[in-house]
Amino acid sequence: MTSSEMTPAAIAEFYFECWAAGDPEPLRDLLHPEVTFDGALGSTRGPDEFLEGLAGMFAATETNTVRLRLASEDDVVTWSELRIGDKAPMQVANWTHVEDGRIVAVRVTFDPRPMFA
């Protein structure tokens, strides 16, 4: 299935499957050339920075359990429980905006205090 045939919900699901596998590279074909990421711990611009940032986050992740996913025509919000190392889990909201079968923007919000405890 090509990216233009995938729904935004399917793209978001694949994003989290890549996270579970610890490998962001399969997402490359689903990224818009001007993809952006903004979150509590940083921002990226463009596919290379985006994938590099994800690689670091994926490597640090013990588990990331999806609790809920809500989708509209172009947007998906995924609520997950993220565990980094032996720290307490964090509740994370991940908003993914998709246009023409490609991820244009990801915004993530969470309380990072458990990471620093």
Image (cartoon, grey):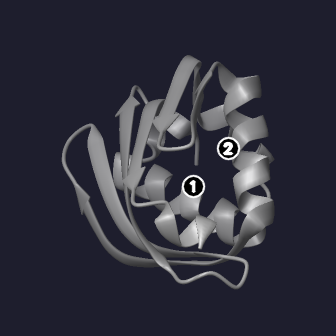
Q: Residues within 10 Å of mark 1 (few under 14, many from 20)?
A: some
Locate residue 22, reporting x and y percent: 78, 64
Q: Is residue 91 above or below residue 35?
A: below
Which label number is shown at residue 117?
none
Quarter placement of the C terminus: bottom right
Judge by depth and name the residue closer to the eye, 1 or 37: 37
Q: Residue at x 71, y 40 (%)?
A: 53
Q: Amino acid at mark 2?
A: Leu
Does residue 7 appear in this view? no
Which label number is shown at residue 27?
2
Mark positioned earlier in the residue sequence (1 or 2): 1
Q: Residue at x 48, y 50 (%)?
A: 11
Which label number is shown at residue 15?
1
Q: Residue at x 73, y 26 (%)?
A: 49
Q: Residues within 10 Å of mark 2 (few under 14, many from 20)?
A: some
Q: Is residue 12 above or below residue 115?
A: above
Q: Is residue 59 above or below residue 107?
A: below
Q: Amino acid at mark 1?
A: Tyr
Please indicate whether residue 27 sits to the left or right of residue 102 in the image: right
Q: Are marks 1 and 2 in contact (CB under 8 Å)?
A: yes
Judge by depth and name the residue closer to the eye, 102 or 3: 102
- Outermost residue, top direction? 34
Locate residue 7, reporting x and y percent: 37, 48
Q: Quadrant of residue 71?
A: bottom left
Badge 2 marks a residue whose secondary structure is helix
Badge 1 marks a residue whose secondary structure is helix
- Outermost residue, front direction? 117
Q: Quadrant of residue 66?
A: bottom left
Does residue 101 appear in this view? yes
Judge by depth and name the residue closer to the eye, 29 or 2: 29
